[in-house]
Amino acid sequence: MKKTKNAVVSLVLALVMMVACVVPSFAADIDDLWDTDRVYDYTDYWYIPEAAVADNSGIYDITKDIKYCKYPDTEYDLYVPNFISKSADQHLILLMHSGAYTSGDKKQQQCFAQYYASRGYIVGNLNYTLRAGENQDASINMMDKEVLLCVKDIVKRTKKMGYKISTMAPAGFSAGGGLALLYANRHQDDSPIPIAFVFEGSGVTSFYFEDWYTEKAYQTVRNKQVYVKTMTGYDVTEKQVKNGYADKLLAKISPISYVNKNTVPTLMAHGGQDTVVPTFMSKEYKKKLKKYGVTYKYVYFENSGHTLESDPDQLLKMAALIDEYCDTYFNE
């Protein structure tokens, strides 16, 4: 599928508006780690991208709010281009929204979903259980499990429609970027659809306690116990904190801990001025990808914060690279 100038512009607009906040970093108190009262304001950002891709709405069919598991607020929208063949292998892009794991909605990804559906890809745009309100037991493990269940449901549903999905790419920004990286690494062997590559922006690559609480004053056993429970869903004793078991639990939800020579091609973007997800995380991830000889591209937004807002040339570069990755790795 040939790229056009208008298509790239639409993607750039979508990229500009798609990112929002993730886990508040360097919190002065453990209670600030997951602030369920904080409001993340990104609603207004979605009007321009919607207009940019509105003229493509007639070339794909949308089924909205498909329930994929028993947990709260677990629905997805499925976009299926109406011009693709049922006799040929098709490809899935699975989108995960941002919002600090406590807020956000799949509508944030709507414009991105529209763009890639118009390019001929099946798109899943999902909600996952947020740690908010009555769902204070929601953890990264739970959210990751939900992503896997969503993929299974997409396979089942599209098969009934007559389509065969041969490969997929998980994708997201901020919190969603972290979930995309985790799925691509943790489920490399058990994903119902083989993973061709992953792309993300401003995503969390590590949940190791010391990467978030860098000051020694906050690195207490009690703080770590609360942190591990919040992030993984598991209680740990003081002994388990001291003997390293707690770190093993955190490793299981940290994408960086899974990187090896078989890691799929990876496309990352991060802002040099990001004070929400520390830039060193993506740089360490990049080093590990390089160490194991993994194919990757790392787009550095030197002047931008978490939302990648101040480097328009890099935004164009990222948009072009996403299309390039789709063209390359979905066709191998």
Image (spheres, helix red, strand yellow):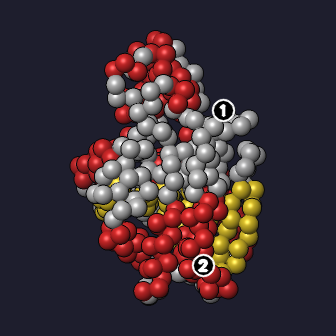
- In the image, is residue 242 above or below residue 49? above
- In the image, is residue 217 above or below residue 297? above
Sequence-first tag of 2 and 1:
2
Q: Residue at x 53, y 23 (%)?
A: 226
The C terminus, quarter of image: bottom left
Residue located beneath label 2 in the image = 51
- In the image, is residue 272 above or below residue 250? below
Q: Residue at x 44, y 56 (%)?
A: 307
Q: Secondary structure at mark 2?
A: helix
Where's residue 106, x and y in %? Answer: 64, 59
| Amino acid identity at mark 2 | Ala
| Amino acid identity at mark 1 | Asp
Label 1 Cα neighbours within 10 Å, binned few <14 / some 14-19 / many ≥20: some
Q: Residue at x 67, y 39 (%)?
A: 132
Quarter of the image for residue 45 reads bottom right
Where's residue 269, x and y in %? Answer: 37, 59
Q: Secondary structure at mark 1?
A: loop
Q: Nearer the viewer, residue 42 or 148?
A: 42
Residue 233 seen in render = yes
Q: Residue at x 60, y 63 (%)?
A: 44
- In the image, is residue 182 above or below residue 78? above
* Closer mark to the observer between disc 2 and disc 1: 2
Where's residue 301, x and y in %? Answer: 32, 59
Rendered image: mark on residue 137: 1
Rendered image: mark on residue 199: none
Q: Nearer the viewer, residue 7 or 61?
A: 7
Quarter of the image for residue 136 reads top right
Where's residue 110, x and y in %? Answer: 61, 68
Q: Nearer the viewer, residue 19 or 203?
A: 19
Residue 146 seen in render = no
Label 2 Cα neighbours within 10 Å, binned few <14 / some 14-19 / many ≥20: few
For the residues labelled 2 and 1, the Cα–Cα distance comes to 38 Å
